[in-house]
Image: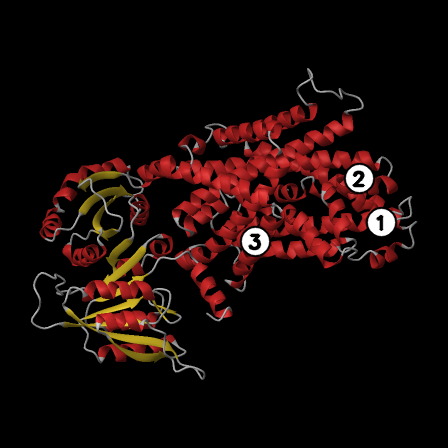
Amino acid sequence: MVGIAAMIGGAIFVLTGPAIGLAGSAVIIVFVLNGVITLFTAMVYAELGSAMPEAGGGYLWIREGLPRPNAFISGWMAWFAHIVAGSLYAVGFGAFLYSLLQTYLLSQPIFGVIPVDKLIAVAAVAAFTYVNVKGTSETGKTGTIVTLAQLGAIVVILAFGFWAMQSNPGWQDNFAEQLLPLGLGGMVAAMGLTFIAFEGYEVIVQTGEEVKNPKRNIPRAIFISLAVVVSLYCLMAFVALAAISPPGGEPAWQFIGGAGELGIAKAVDLFMPYGLYVVLAGGIVSTLAALNATTFSSARVALAMGRNYNLPAALGSIHPVNKTPHVAAVVSGIIMAVMAYALPLQEIALAAAVIFLLLFTQVNIAAITIRRIYGDKLSYGYKIPFFPIIPIIGIILKLGLAVYLLVTQPLSWGITVLWILVGFVLYRMYQFKKEVEHYAPLVTTEGTQERRDYRILVIYSPENPDRLAKYAIRAAKEAGGEVNVLRIITVPSQTPLSAGSAFAESARKGFAPLEQMFGDRDVLNHYLVRVSHDTTEAILATIEEQKISLLIADFETVRRNKKLMTLATCDMLAVKAEDDVLQLDDQMMPAEKKNMVVVYDGGAHANLVLKVTSWLEHSGRFKVDVLAIGKKDDDSDGSIPMKPDYLAQLGIELKEASLSETAGESAASVFSAIDSYRPDLVVMGSSIGRFSVFDSPALLQMIKQLQCPVIVARDFGIPGVRKATTFFMKVLGK
């Protein structure tokens, strides 16, 4: 009922007429195609809604699957979009009710200044805010009653329409003659006009914490409501075209389309007694049902953001008796009422459409990364078939529609960008600090006030604190940067974080050897101690807070932490060095240089590999050999384009090798080539060709077999953007 209410809204009565004017009888195809397009993202929502059924929906999943700023921005956008949608439904309700009753009531503004329809809209928002504060049961019962009334009105209209078709024997000809009167362009325009009406399934996932058996029921609710709504839209358009013979003799599509938003009302008035009033009444209950659903969902988004300290924590509170997010509901309701009364909602509603499309795009990306992070650790009630093809198609379709709105409605993008900028400034200046203080408070910090632009983060290891520090020192001296050492005091989830403060002084003393090491080498450094229930959250918070450029961590720590790899917004060096005795100082030249082998594949991480190579080579302690790797096929010798000028400056000779089709054969080939150099240090990217070093058992075994330190470089990039860029560059032949 929540999904049906949100998807039908008043759109079935208001948008169907203009859509028929654009597409003619092909409007039925338009609704089916929109349903199919929507299905790609609906499947993503069904999977994540069954596996992670919590209030917040898309915001929560983006928080789990994309870097932190995306989580706040997505929640900020979703909250705004739900509030705008609720305001729009409230204004629609006020307009419908006022149109129906203005003959019997005042037709002038109250006191000459207060519009009656706006007053009705505000009263409706207040009423449903109260219902949502009272309890989920009351919200559900009210929504069910209103939605049943809405469906009842639609069924009555359809019944009269099919009855009227009996006295209109030539109705079949209407569809043949009226197909695509404005061509394919009109059909595409009709799809763009009505597409957003099918996205209400997003509201369903907001019930995750309050619905019985969400693993089963949320996917069912999404698919059933989508099937019902697409069917109802198609049937409404069908009977509107088939059941009428316009009095002027013009084609039915022209008669309906010419009346615009009132097209369906005028068509129903021709075949049903008091049809105009029935449509108005249907519009009233439809907008009420949608208002109830969006009031519910906007409060849940605010609740989730308050819990995670992305909005003031008071929004995350639950009423002690009603068990509802009462503060979030009241605040959302107040903003909704102000918007409904004071703002020009048509332009803002278009911005809400853009925001929903961007939100759905992020959710599709998050679905891919969540599978990668959690794998089979989540319990799914539904899993997307043909993964990851389905979410990738969803990304393309949502971005395509967003670009369409950019071209046709540029003001909608202007409002969207402005809202995002306001949210981002609020996040960076205030809420991010609150979020960090809650999840990973800083209990000790040491270091000078001076800061450098290039900042390196090292995770402190009590067992061997200087093992990673020497690589950080080398990078800092070459890049003109600073080193930040992070020590994390982890406490059990049931223990308050304040308990960890007792260990702050002992943690501070453990930094003394590193402080001496940094001082001797004249490297600017800072020491940070955080207390957290989650080590990964502490690292991610530090990366964002300190604006870290490069993270240096133990290889096994990185390999086992897919969440860190996915959400970290900086470059990363994973160092495998159990018995590392390498000296990296450039103060005293060695008698004999060590062998450093650089594995280069020209891929996503190649630039960082070359940068690390230059840092280490400048120490004067290494003789560098480069192994260039490519894929062997019939049309290529397997080589990868290198940067010969860059290599010539370093005095490096280039050698080449090729990959096979399987990871096992490729790993054996690469290992053999590396081992032939008798390396003392190996530097490689986190992928070799199309194989991931962290995910391929064969490559992991290869690294384990190398009897020397290994540095795996991972260049930061937005998920999917690098692959998309590479694809388009290939298409353009560059």
Circle 1 sits in a helix, a strand or a loop, which is it?
A: helix
CA gap, disc 3 and disc 2: 31 Å
Report x, y in % for residue 697.
34, 70
Report x, y in % for residue 37.
62, 56
Image quarter (top left, top right, bottom left or bottom right) of the N terminus: top right
Residue 55 visible in the snapshot: no
> Pointers 1 and 3 in contact (CB under 8 A)?
no
* Amino acid type shown at disc 1: Ala
User: Which residue position holds label 2?
Assistant: 265
Sort mark 1 into few (<14), some (14-19) or many (20+) by Cα contacts within 10 Å.
many
Circle 3 sits in a helix, a strand or a loop, which is it?
A: helix
Q: Quadrant of residue 179?
A: bottom right
Q: Residue at x 59, y 38 (%)?
A: 348
Outermost bottom residue: 634
- Look at discs 3 and 2 and give the one toward the viewer: 3
CA gap, disc 2 and disc 1: 13 Å
Q: Which mark is residue 252?
A: 1
The answer to which of 710 and 46 lies nearer the viewer is: 710
The answer to which of 649 and 11 lies nearer the viewer is: 649
Q: Quadrant of residue 128?
A: top right
